[in-house]
Amino acid sequence: MTAARDASPVVSCIDIDVPHGTRHQGLPSDLYAITVYCDDELRCSEEGEDFVPEVTVSAMRTRPGQFTSSGRGQLAIALLAPEAMTAVLRAPLEGLVDCRVPLAQLCGMGAQRGLRDRLRTAASTSERAHRFQHWIGERMGARSPLSPAQRRVSRATQLMAQPTAELTTVASTVGASLRQLERDFDHWLGVSPSHFMRLTRFQRAVKSIAEGGSLADTAIDCGFSDQPHLTRSVRRLGGETPRFFGRDSSAPRAVLADRLLISGPPGVVFGSAGPTARGEAHLVARAAQA
């Protein structure tokens, strides 16, 4: 296996100005997100939520999620690989998948209000991003050492990011049986090891397709057995055929942390700072046609 991926958190500050009822879609991803709503007028809700967002934790998304946004303001978003999220939260995410919860539910109201106040009082966007990075660094550096199970999960997720990764080899490398690894993943990440691997492969594939990669080459490079296997997998997870995510498609998209994270119906336009954004990103949307 090749070297493990860079799991450094990616912080972006996103400016939003959208009419009431703007719709967009979050795509399945192997990343978690901590989102700070820096302005009171800004709202973004997902079906089933019953709280006013201040700071939210987005669990791993295994299927497309439908969101409705309104208002004007700025979001500060930290995208974290599982190994980074485990170190930041130190809280098990068992049962939390395809949902967003308040940060207070996992870390307490003091942590939620403290982070939001710290970011809202920043004098500039760059300072806001810096403060967010500093908060993440504080939590990663000031906590007690990870447990053996947390270390196994963190190491395994890095190994699974490789296109040629095999579950049995990963389990052996981290010193666990497949069953033990499944228990570790379910407890700390809320998903199984096999599902996590499917998510990493899905993101790798749609990102390649969005950048103009052919379906045949993408299938080979991303570890699919053949092009039909790629098509079935992308449709199953993303709800669309691979060509929907292609470079020439009219479907909107936003790319952050080297992931294709946002899509939606024609009529909604997204722009981003690119696949390696680490300071600022800008998102502009207009309401979808009825």
Image (cartoon, rainbow, N blue to C red):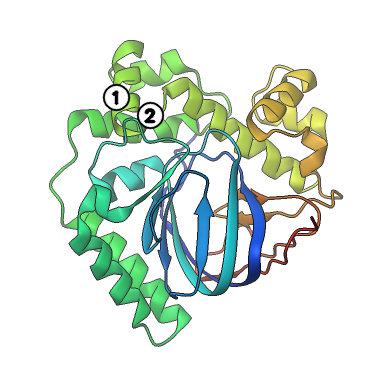
Residue 14, horizontal then vertical, whole percent? 54, 69
User: Which residue is under mark 2?
Assistant: 156
- Answer above or below: position of 266 versus 60: below
For residue 130, what is the image quadrant? bottom left
Name the amino acid, label 1.
Asp
Name the outermost residue toward the left: 144
Q: Which mark is residue 101?
A: none
Residue at point 72%, 28% (across, down): 235
> Badge 1: how crowded within 10 Å, few (<14), some, or many (20+)?
many
The residue nearer to you, when weighing 188 against 16, is: 16
Q: Percent position (x, y) of residue 288?
A: 75, 58
Residue extending farthest right:
248
Q: Is residue 60 above or below residue 167?
A: below
Q: Amino acid at mark 2?
A: Ala
In the image, residue 280 above or below residue 258 = below
Question: Residue 18 appears at what percent x and percent y?
Answer: 64, 70
Pointer 2 or 1: first along the chain:
2
Q: Which residue is located at x 66 percent, y 55 percent? A: 23
Residue 141: quadrant of the picture: bottom left
Give the residue at x 75% y 47%: 210
Gap between marks 2 and 1 measured at Cα: 10 Å
Of 266 and 210, which appears nearest the observer?
266
Q: In the rendered view, does 170 fall on the left or right side of 250?
A: left
In the displayed structure, 245 sits above or below 258; it is: above
SS for dot 1: helix
Task: Please indicate whether residue 192 sits to the left or right of residue 148 in the image.
Answer: right
Decide if residue 9 is on the left or right side of residue 228.
Answer: left
138 relative position to 190: left or right:
left
* Quarter of the image where the C terminus is located: bottom right
Q: Which residue is mark 1?
A: 184
Tell me if label 2 and label 1 are in contact, CB under 8 Å.
yes
